[in-house]
Image: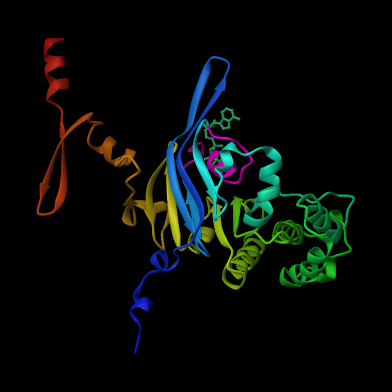
Amino acid sequence: MISSNNKLDSRERRNKVVLLAEDLIKIYRTGESETQALRGVSLKVHEGEKVFLIGPSGSGKTTLVNILAGIDKPTSGKVFWEDLREDITRSSHEAIIKNRRNYVGVIFQDSKLIPHLTVEENIRLTAHYANLDSDETEKRLEFILKFMGIWEKRNKKQNKLSGGEQKRAAIASTLITNPRIIIGDEPTGNLDIVTSNKILDLLDKINVELNVALLIVTHSQLVAQRADRIIEFSDGVILAQHSKNIQLRELKRTRELEMDRQNRIHIPQSILEELNNPKHFTINLENKKIVLRPIYQQEDERENIG
Ligand SMILES: Nc1ncnc2c1ncn2[C@@H]1O[C@H](COP(=O)(O)OP(=O)(O)OP(=O)(O)O)[C@@H](O)[C@H]1O
Ligand SMILES: [Mg+2]
């Protein structure tokens, strides 16, 4: 007999939260100007979940993942890593580096190795910075190099490796510290399609076999179709979530608008434009549906007066 648990979808089955963000706001101030890059972002990633982050250029994706990874601080808001009790936005730089090794691995589009060191030396150096003891480093090193398919390349330096091998080595460096989640900002952005696919297969393998959650920023359809869940970002807020099988060019077909912690829902810009950008609405419940009707009256009256 099939137990009722099997009917739960992946979101419900994975209860343990590995990453939690609450009400993140980030304001960049440069001289006179001010950019609100994050305007109140809250999210959770569960153990072993594969979440992708999409959204237009400048919508705040890099700002968000840098804050979630402890690389940058928000103007306000909180970030928690799994069972670490402290809010990492208040932790010292040293505490973040120390804690990152048990919780979070980070990969960037241009993740680089240190050029005069071999692959193995690069990974050892990461382990050293993370204060991993040498027994543990030895135990994990061979496993990780083989897992990433670069055992044969362990004594090579960066200039003797292909782009894909360099990326594997960078991911291996991240894995040596045994993170619960890998955060990536367009990690395959500068690779060709074949190499990208191989790296994505490896990330899938890390996700499934090592139960490491993934939170990956992407502009690529190729990448997005591999997600458990997709978060759509727009202008510094989470606009919507999507389940599997999305088409990046047709997001409105799969969009589930997301209510934030203050019960706010953001209406997609394309819909507002189609309605001539109304500023006021009536709201009613009709057959258990929420119906918003734009009101144009005030503007019309003002125009008449003018
Ligand atoms: N260091 C900074 N100083 C000032 N403004 C910044 C800084 N970093 C980012 N911004 C601004 O914050 C907003 C969000 O930028 P962010 O890099 O997070 O966007 P993104 O979604 O990652 O874009 P892309 O898809 O192009 O990488 C943009 O308006 C950007 O110009
Ligand atoms: Mg970016």
Looking at the rendering, which quadrant does residue 169 occupy? bottom right
The residue located at (22%, 36%) in the rendering is 275
Q: Position of residue 272 (x, y in %)?
A: 27, 36
Residue 250 seen in render: no
> Is residue 113 visible in this depiction of the protein?
yes
Name the quarter where the N terminus is drawn. bottom left
In the image: residue 251, left or right of residue 212:
left
* Left or right: residue 288 compared with residue 222: left
- Residue at the far top in the pictured view: 306
Q: Residue at x 85, y 54 (%)?
A: 159
Give residue 297's quadrant in the image.
top left
Quadrant into which the C terminus falls: top left
Magenta-drawn segment: 56-74
Residue at the farthest left position: 287
User: Where on the image, by quarter, is ligand 1?
Assistant: top right
* Number of dots carrying numbers: 0
* Residue nearest the viewer, comparing 172 with 128: 128
The answer to whether residue 296 is above or below residue 95 is above
Q: Residue furthest bottom?
A: 1
The residue sitting at 76% across, 49% down in the picture is 112
Q: Residue furthest front?
A: 85
Residue 163 included in the magenta stretch of the image: no
In this rendered view, identify the residue nearer to me: 23 or 252: 23
Q: Position of residue 4 (x, y in %)?
A: 33, 79
Was residue 66 drawn as part of the magenta stretch in this picture?
A: yes
Residue appearing at x 84%, y 71% in the figure: 152
Identify the image's colour scheme: rainbow, by chain, secondary structure or one colour: rainbow
Q: Is residue 38 above or below residue 203?
A: above
93, above or below 179, in the image: above
Q: Position of residue 21 (x, y in %)?
A: 48, 45
